[in-house]
Image: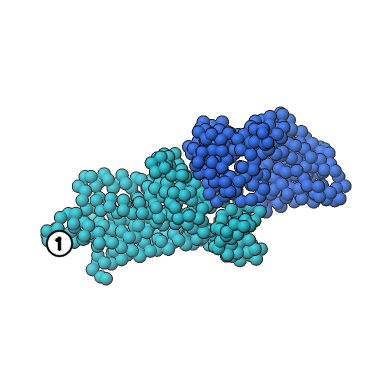
Chain colours: A cyan, B blue
């Protein structure tokens, strides 16, 4: 055996402590860098949006009533909501854009939530281990498909297929965009829901099986309810992704700012509006600020949805830990 | 960005004698003017050509105020603008037609409608006519395709055909002529507009004036017979001379007119 003199042990320990501190500091800095970046982005976006609410000159065109209430566009016609910011008199109603985003996101999540959750339930509870090891990465791979590719698929293939099947008047509409969007959200819902289901302790399943329940009954009646807040969080996170998704809706929704409840009408979302109009807008103009205002609203919605999802996930952990 | 450009224009106007030509005006022509400037500067590196947009009206008032040497405009100058210029600078306006612009409407090739009057097109895009039956087609809803508001064609149709009215809310906006052509080719009740297109599945609509059906051919656009066409102008204070003259000459030369075709407008000759 080789013995080290006591002095060297002390110095090597001290060196390790210093290194530990350094690494810790660096990692902390990196973590806060992310937070700082998000905060700064929000500050920038909000600052650019501020003139729509603060500047007297712009208030002339963009009063709150013009943004949110119906306006008479042509004499002799009933007042309507209209988005047509490039015009002699800009029409800047945000209502059609809200409705567009809501319609497309709801179609997306209504399709993606059951698919994602049931797939997660099958993968975590019922699938044989070898199938599971193959299935999980395969579904998660779908998250890696660029959204522009999904949008292109929707534009060229899905739109024609849906129109021919259902005889739709509009080839590009909220339904097509929503269905394509669901392809992008399924992996999000699946991944988070699968984690929540896997986090349910073995003892739950063993107790249920010992009482004579089948594997399906155990999965459906015991594991799923136990992980419910986490599964809900998965769906909320999916909704957040749907609201912010741009490329798919830009390509597949037709981008007509119509106020209608029909899912088969063409529709224009908030995110697609920013993407389509930011390219040519005059920097610093009223239209420019308005696009940033839409950005702020999207940011806030995404933030709130993510917050809710985070709270849901926390509740799962607390509940399964035995504390309520 | 615009602010920086504007400062650049003001600065260069002050230094105009130092081999710099400023070009300001029509947003429709800004890409065309930029390409002309690039090529002209390749030929003669000593002359700097500064191109900015802002709109035809902005360009003309800059010409009146002396802050630009060439104003580009996609409309002809109004009489009171000519008077203002005369009063302020004692020079006569020189108008030069540099290129032609025309917009084509297309429908799906299965659509029996071959021509429409400008009034019918206007009503269709304002949303007053919503069924093909009303303009001599089958009993089916008209599906409108339009361009994004950033497009010069969007503004041209809005000003020229809709007389500054608003597009129907049901008009779907797509990026680029190619996307519109593709959409109309797949949509049998669709109608769209853009530059000249030679795609499968769509048919160019002729525009009916009286009993005559006019197709958007090069000849008809060039002669101004096609109703949905316009001239793209340069306006100058007095006859061109020096660097300005050589730039104008370049734009009108065979090389300059080849650029017109490349950018998507119609050449003069």
Q: Is residue B20 left or right of residue A164?
A: right
B267 or B226: which is nearer to us? B226
Please identify the quarter of the rendering in which residue B236 is found: top right
Q: Is residue B109 visible?
A: yes
- In the image, residue A138 above or below residue A60: above
Quarter of the image that includes the C terminus of chain A: bottom left
Across and down, in percent, residue B23 comes to 73, 43
Provide the secondary structure element on which disc 1 rests: helix
Quarter of the image that includes the N terminus of chain A: bottom left
A297 or A84: which is nearer to us? A84
Q: Is residue B215 left or right of residue B141?
A: right
Name the residue rendered at 55%, 51% in the picture: B169
Chain where mark 1 sits: A
Within 10 angstroms of label 1, few (less than 14), some, or many (20 or more) residues? few
Across and down, in percent, residue A19 comes to 37, 59
Across and down, in percent, residue A79 comes to 57, 60
Q: Is residue B46 visible?
A: no
Please identify the quarter of the rendering in which residue A283 is found: bottom right
Query: Number of labelled discs?
Result: 1
Name the residue rendered at 50%, 61% in the picture: A297
Name the residue rendered at 74%, 47% in the picture: B59
Across and down, in percent, residue A41 comes to 51, 59
Label 1, on which residue? A207
Q: Is residue A219 left or right of residue B165?
A: left
Name the residue rendered at 65%, 66% in the picture: A56
Task: Determine the residue located farthest toward the bottom in the rendered image.
Answer: A324
């Amino acid at each position: 055996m080789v013995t080290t003199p006591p002095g060297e042990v002390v110095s090597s320990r001290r060196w390790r402590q210093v290194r530990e501190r350094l690494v810790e500091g660096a990692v902390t800095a990196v973590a806060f860098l992310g937070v700082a970046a998000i905060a700064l982005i929000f500050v920038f976006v909000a600052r650019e949006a501020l003139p729509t609410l603060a500047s007297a000159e712009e208030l002339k065109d963009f009063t709150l009533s013009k943004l949110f209430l119906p306006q008479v566009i042509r004499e002799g016609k009933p007042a309507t909501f209209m988005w047509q910011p490039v015009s002699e008199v800009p029409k800047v109603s945000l209502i059609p854009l809200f409705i567009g985003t809501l319609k497309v996101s709801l179609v997306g999540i209504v399709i993606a939530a059951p698919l994602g959750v049931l797939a997660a339930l099958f993968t975590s509870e019922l699938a044989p281990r070898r199938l599971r090891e193959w299935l999980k990465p395969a579904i998660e791979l779908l998250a890696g498909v660029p959204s522009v590719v999904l949008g292109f698929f929707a534009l060229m293939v899905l739109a024609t297929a849906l129109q021919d099947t259902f005889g739709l008047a509009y080839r590009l509409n909220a339904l097509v965009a929503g269905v394509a969007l669901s392809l992008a959200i399924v992996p999000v819902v699946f991944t988070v829901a699968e984690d929540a289901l896997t986090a349910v302790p073995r003892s739950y399943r063993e107790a249920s099986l010992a009482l004579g329940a089948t594997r399906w009954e155990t999965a459906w009646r015991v594991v799923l309810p136990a992980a419910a807040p986490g599964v809900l969080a998965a769906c909320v996170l999916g909704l957040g992704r749907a609201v912010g998704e741009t490329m798919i809706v830009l390509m597949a929704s037709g981008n007509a700012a119509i106020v209608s409840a029909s899912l088969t009408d063409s529709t224009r979302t908030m995110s697609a509006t920013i993407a389509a109009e930011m390219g040519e807008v005059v920097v610093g103009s009223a239209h420019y600020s308005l696009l940033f205002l839409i950005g702020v609203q999207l940011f806030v919605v995404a933030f709130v949805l993510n917050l809710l999802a985070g709270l849901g996930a926390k509740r799962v952990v607390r509940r399964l830990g035995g504390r309520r | 960005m615009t602010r920086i450009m504007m400062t650049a224009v003001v600065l260069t106007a002050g230094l105009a004698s130092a081999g710099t030509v400023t070009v300001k005006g029509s947003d429709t022509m800004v890409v065309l003017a930029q390409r002309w400037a690039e090529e002209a500067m390749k030929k003669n590196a000593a002359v700097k050509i500064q191109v900015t947009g802002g709109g035809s009206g902005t360009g003309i008032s800059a010409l009146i105020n002396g802050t630009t040497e060439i104003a580009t405009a996609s409309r002809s100058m109004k009489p009171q603008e000519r008077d203002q210029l005369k009063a302020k600078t004692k020079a006569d306006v020189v108008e030069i037609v540099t290129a032609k612009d025309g917009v084509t409407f297309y429908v799906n090739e299965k659509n029996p409608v071959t021509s429409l009057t400008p009034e019918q097109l206007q009503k269709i895009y304002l949303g007053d006519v919503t069924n093909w039956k009303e303009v001599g087609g089958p009993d089916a809803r008209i599906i409108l395709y339009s361009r994004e508001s950033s497009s010069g064609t969007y503004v041209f149709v809005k000003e020229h055909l809709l007389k500054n009215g608003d597009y129907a809310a049901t008009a779907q906006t797509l990026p680029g002529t190619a996307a519109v052509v593709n959409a109309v080719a797949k949509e049998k009740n669709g109608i769209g507009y853009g530059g000249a297109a030679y795609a499968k599945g769509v048919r160019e609509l002729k525009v009916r004036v009286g009993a005559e059906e006019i197709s958007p051919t090069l000849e008809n656009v060039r002669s101004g017979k096609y109703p949905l066409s316009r001239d793209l102008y340069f306006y100058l204070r007095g006859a061109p001379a020096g660097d300005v003259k050589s730039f104008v000459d370049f734009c009108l030369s065979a090389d300059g007119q080849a650029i017109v075709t490349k950018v998507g407008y119609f050449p003069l000759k």
